[in-house]
Each structure stands twice: as structure tokens, then as C-alpha cells.
Amino acid sequence: MKGNKLTPGSNMRWESSRMILPEHREQWLKHQEKHNKAKKPELDPQRWEELEWLLSDAMRNNDSLRFTYWQDGLFFEVIGVCHYINHAQQQFHLMTQDGVHYLSFHKLVNVDLYKAQ
């Protein structure tokens, strides 16, 4: 005869081991997050040259661009018009719907034309 947890003879001593302490959960989530992070892809010189052509055409025509960048193991996108390229500080000045956004050269992963749908 098999009983439930509340019937006599059940093993109540080990039932509490199913509980996860908040500290353990927090460490487990950090561990999972660390495993899900990606390494930053490096752009080769040929790809940089392609991006320079795309950027110069887009700046001349005031086209919207989608900038994909890497930060802390995760990829993000920002959409806007490249207003200025600051070579001294190595960053792009982007005009977005939320205002000016500064994007560092070393975070950049990809740039492509953005066509609103």
C-alpha cells in the first residue's frame, strides 16, 4: 500500500530537501547566465571597410541603420541615424527616437540598413 506524504510511514524527513534556498537559487541563476553569455566576435579589416562604405552612404542619405553591438556577453540592437563618427573617442553618435546614443567602436558587431515596416 502506497500512502501520500501525510499518511503514517511516509518519509517526511527528506521532504524538506526539495526546497531551494534563495542563496542557492541566486547562484544557480548566475551560473546559468554565465553559460548563456557569448564571446564577442571580432570584425576583420575587410568587414570594417564594408561597414565604412555603408556608414558613409547612410550618412550622406540620412538613412536609418540597425547597429548590433555586444556588451557583457549579450547582443543588443539600436536603430537610428549615424549623426557623427568621433574618431578621437572611438564612438558613433546616433540619433534615435530616445535621443542621442553613443556607441563605442569596440562594441560593434554589425551594421545594416533599417527599413521600417
Image (tube, rainbow, N blue to C red):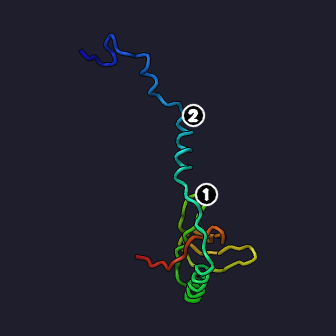
Secondary structure beneath label 1: loop
Residue in the picture at 55% in, 44% down: 31
Three-letter residue code for mark 2: Glu
- Figure quadrant of residue 15: top left
Compare residues 15 and 98 and report the one nearer the observer.
15
Looking at the rendered structure, which numbered label has been put on residue 23?
Answer: 2
Secondary structure beneath label 2: helix
Residue in the picture at 76% in, 76% down: 88
Considering the image in quadrants, where does the N terminus appear? top left
Against 31, residue 97 (above or below) is: below
> How many angstroms separate mark 1 from mark 2 (CA)?
23 Å
Q: Residue furthest right?
A: 88
Residue in the picture at 68% in, 73% down: 91
Q: Closer to the N terminus: mark 1 or mark 2?
A: 2
- Report which residue position mark 1 lands on: 72
Considering the image in quadrants, where does the C terminus appear? bottom left
Residue in the picture at 61% in, 69% down: 42
Three-letter residue code for mark 1: Asp
- Residue 7 on image: x %, y %: 31, 13
Near mark 1 (Cα within 10 A), the count class, few <14, some 14-19 or many ≥20, is: few
- Residue 53 on image: x %, y %: 58, 86
- Residue 62 on image: x %, y %: 56, 85
- Give the side of residue 64 with respect to residue 72, left or right: left
- Residue 37 on image: x %, y %: 55, 55
Near mark 2 (Cα within 10 A), the count class, few <14, some 14-19 or many ≥20, is: few
- Figure quadrant of residue 87: bottom right
Contact check, label 1 and label 2, Cβ < 8 Å: no
Against 62, residue 110 (above or below) is: above
- Figure quadrant of residue 54: bottom right
